[in-house]
C-alpha cells in the first residue's frame, strides 16, 4: 500500500464527567459539533484497509446491491461525549466487548446484527480525523467486509433515531461509543445498564426481553 499522510486527531478538551448527559440524551446539539482539528490541514485521504489475519477467507468481489456501505469515517468531538467516530451521515459508531481486536473478529450476527448493523465497506472508506493505520476490515460470516477501528469491528445502533445520538452507550454493559483510536469512550456513562431495543424481526416487543437477543 502506498504511504499516505495520516490524519491526526488533536483532542480539543477533556469532557468532564459531571457534564455527562443522562441516559437517553438525544444529542440535539451534538450533530452540529465541529470535527476535531486536523494536523497540518491535510486533505482527506482514502485508504484501502488490509484484511486482518483472522479474516483470510476471501471477501465477495462486490457487496450485495442491497447492502448499505459506510463510505466515510469521521473522527470528531461532540458535546458531552467527547471523542467519537461517525459515518458519512453523522451516525455515531460503537464497539462490542464480545468481539476481539487481536485478531479482529465480529461476534454480532443474526438478531444482534439487526440491532447493531455492522459498518460495511467495499475497501475504500474516506477518512477524516481517523488515522489510516487504525482502520482496517474483517470478513464477516456472510462474506461482507466490516470496518474496524483499532482492530475493533464497528457498528451503528438502531436505537439512535437521528445522527449525533448515543443511546447505545453501555447497553448491556458491552456496547460503547468508539473513539478514533479504537478505545472505548467512557466519558459519559448512563446510570444503570440500558437494554437494547428489540430486533426488528421480533414484532410486538418494546425491548430485548424475551426476544432471545441478550446483547
Image: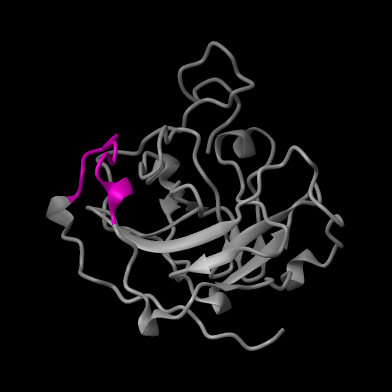
Please give the name of the residue rendered at 63% of the width and 45% of the height, measured from the top-left corner: 108
Please give the name of the residue rendered at 43% of the width and 70% of the height, measured from the top-left corner: 129
User: In the image shown, does 215 or 44 lie closer to the viewer?
Assistant: 44
Question: Magenta span has 22?
Answer: yes
* Residue 79 relative to residue 186: left or right: left
Please give the name of the residue rendered at 27% of the width and 43% of the height, measured from the top-left corner: 190
Please give the name of the residue rendered at 20% of the width and 68% of the height, measured from the top-left corner: 14
* Residue 96 relative to residue 147: left or right: left
Question: Magenta span has 18?
Answer: no
With respect to residue 192, does 130 lie above or below? below
Residue 94 in the image, given as x and y percentages of width and height: 48, 51
With respect to residue 200, does 3 lie above or below? below
User: In the image shown, does 78 or 71 lie closer to the viewer?
Assistant: 71
Number of marks in the image?
Answer: 0
Residue 23 in the image, given as x and y percentages of width and height: 27, 37
Residue 201 in the image, given as x and y percentages of width and height: 64, 21
Q: Which residues are magenta?
A: 20-33
**Displayed quadrant of residue 16:** bottom left
Q: Quadrant of the N terminus?
A: bottom right
Determine the main secondary structure of the stretch shown in magenta: loop
Residue 111 in the image, given as x and y percentages of width and height: 64, 32
User: In the image shown, does 170 or 46 lie closer to the viewer?
Assistant: 46
Amino acid at each position: 500500500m502506498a504511504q499516505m499522510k495520516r490524519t491526526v486527531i488533536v483532542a480539543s478538551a477533556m469532557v468532564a464527567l459531571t457534564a455527562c448527559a443522562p441516559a437517553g440524551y438525544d444529542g440535539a446539539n451534538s450533530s452540529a459539533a465541529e470535527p476535531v482539528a486536523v494536523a497540518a490541514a491535510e486533505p482527506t485521504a482514502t485508504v484501502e484497509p488490509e484484511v486482518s489475519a483472522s479474516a483470510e477467507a476471501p471477501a465477495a468481489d462486490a457487496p450485495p446491491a442491497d447492502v448499505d456501505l459506510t463510505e466515510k469515517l469521521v473522527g470528531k468531538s461532540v458535546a458531552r461525549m467527547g471523542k467519537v467516530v461517525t459515518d458519512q451521515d453523522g451516525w455515531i459508531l460503537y464497539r462490542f466487548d464480545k468481539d476481539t481486536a487481536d485478531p479482529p473478529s465480529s461476534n454480532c450476527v443474526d438478531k444482534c446484527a439487526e440491532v447493531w448493523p455492522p459498518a460495511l465497506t467495499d475497501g475504500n472508506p474516506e477518512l477524516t480525523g481517523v488515522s489510516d493505520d487504525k482502520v482496517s476490515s474483517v470478513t464477516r460470516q456472510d462474506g461482507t467486509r466490516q470496518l474496524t477501528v483499532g482492530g475493533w469491528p464497528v457498528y451503528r445502533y438502531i436505537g439512535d433515531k437521528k445522527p449525533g445520538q448515543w443511546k447505545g452507550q453501555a447497553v448491556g454493559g458491552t456496547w460503547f461509543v468508539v473513539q478514533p483510536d479504537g478505545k472505548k469512550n467512557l466519558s459519559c456513562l448512563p446510570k444503570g445498564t440500558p437494554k437494547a431495543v428489540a430486533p426488528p424481526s421480533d414484532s410486538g416487543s418494546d425491548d430485548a426481553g424475551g426476544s432471545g437477543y441478550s446483547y
